[in-house]
């Protein structure tokens, strides 16, 4: 299938690109950074990878690609500033409006965050991801009505990627997040990629859902709103 994934140069997006390529899919990646996928030495020759450097918050920079069958909106930032809204929400809407609404589409996925459900972390980040979750429900209705395609959001808690390195490397923040995480660990990028694959390829009947994949992370107000 023709799979478009944003944010493929790092973390979950890179792991998801490799997961799909190994299964023989044609993956198109969009990132502000250089291609880090093609150089992976364990990529199956049966799949393919095309990389575009573009900023999803600037819709005029998005490449023209037709017939996307799976769209995974993954690119995101966590800055605690207006940039979180510009990239995570506006950028994600730019990508979805450009590629999702056409006859080949089969599944659209959003990497939201458990922050959308709990309110944890930076205000602008939580707001951006709550916006994504609301937008997902709107897209799910439009896609189901016209194309019978699925559309869901994954709400990860901690995943051990660069995005959250500032937590992993701060003993006091790490203790606070583990206190509100019953499974007492974070997911790996590969675990998160497996969810991306499952929700868009294996799943054919779950749609319009924001799925909590956080090891049980719960809102704990003053314990876990970053200063
Ligand atoms: N890591 C976590 O703990 C965690 C938890 C919940 C949700 N998420 C979400 O999962 C997604 C992936 O996060 P990650 O942990 O893999 O982060 P990451 O920082 O490792 O990767 C994010 C990728 O997005 C790219 N990107 C950033 N801004 C972009 C833009 N404007 N245009 C195009 N590409 C851009 C980056 O260059 C990078 O390659 C994000 O949306 C993030 O909010 C992550």
Image (spheres, rainbow, N blue to C red):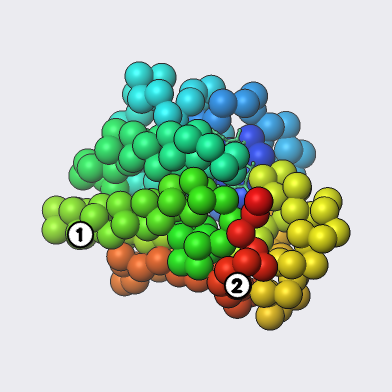
- Say if residue 4 shows up in the picture: no
Q: What residue sits 36% from the left and 51% below the top?
A: 131
- Identify which residue, 45 or 195, lies in the foreground: 195
- Say if residue 133 shows up in the picture: yes
Q: Which residue is mark 2?
A: 220
Where residue 39 sits: x, y (%)?
72, 32
Q: Which mark is residue 50?
A: none
Q: Is residue 159 above or below residue 221?
A: above
Where residue 192 sits: x, y (%)?
60, 59
For the residue labelled by badge 2, is the local secondary structure a helix, a strand or a loop? loop
Figure quadrant, ligand 1: top right
Cα distance, mark 1 to mark 2?
32 Å
Q: Is residue 226 above or below residue 102?
A: below
Q: What residue sits 53% from the left and 22% below the top?
A: 53
Report the residue that reaches farthest toward the bottom. Answer: 182
Q: Is residue 63 left or right of residue 82?
A: left
- Identify which residue, 194 or 85, lies in the foreground: 85
Local crowd at mark 2 within 10 Å, few (<14), some, or many (≥20)? Answer: some
Report the residue that reaches farthest toward the left. Answer: 145
Q: Which residue is mark 1?
A: 141
Q: Is residue 62 left or right of residue 195?
A: left
Q: Earlier in the sequence, mark 1 or mark 2?
A: 1
Q: Is residue 68 above or below residue 65?
A: below
Q: Is residue 198 left or right of residue 225?
A: left
Q: What residue sits 75% from the left and 47% below the top?
A: 166
Image quarter for residue 45? top right
């Amino acid at each position: 299938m023709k799979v478009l994934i944003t944010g493929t140069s790092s973390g979950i997006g890179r792991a998801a690109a490799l997961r799909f390529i190994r299964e023989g899919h044609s993956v198109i990646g969009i990132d502000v950074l250089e291609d880090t996928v093609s150089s992976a030495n364990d990529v199956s020759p049966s799949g393919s990878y095309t990389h575009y450097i573009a900023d999803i918050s600037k819709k005029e920079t998005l490449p023209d690609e037709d017939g996307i069958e799976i769209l995974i909106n993954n690119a995101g930032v966590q800055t605690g500033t207006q940039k979180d809204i510009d990239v995570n929400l506006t950028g994600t809407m730019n990508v979805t409006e450009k590629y999702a609404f056409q006859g080949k589409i089969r599944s659209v996925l959003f990497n939201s965050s458990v922050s959308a459900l709990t309110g944890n972390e930076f205000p602008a980040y939580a707001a951006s991801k709550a916006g994504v979750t609301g937008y997902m429900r709107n897209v799910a209705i439009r896609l189901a009505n016209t194309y019978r395609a699925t559309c869901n959001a994954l709400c990860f808690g901690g995943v051990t990627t660069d995005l959250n390195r500032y937590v992993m490397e701060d003993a006091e923040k790490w203790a606070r997040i583990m206190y509100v995480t019953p499974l007492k660990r974070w997911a790996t990028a590969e675990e998160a990629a497996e969810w991306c694959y499952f929700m868009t390829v294996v799943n054919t009947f779950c749609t319009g859902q924001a799925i909590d994949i956080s090891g049980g992370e719960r809102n704990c107000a003053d314990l876990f709103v970053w200063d």
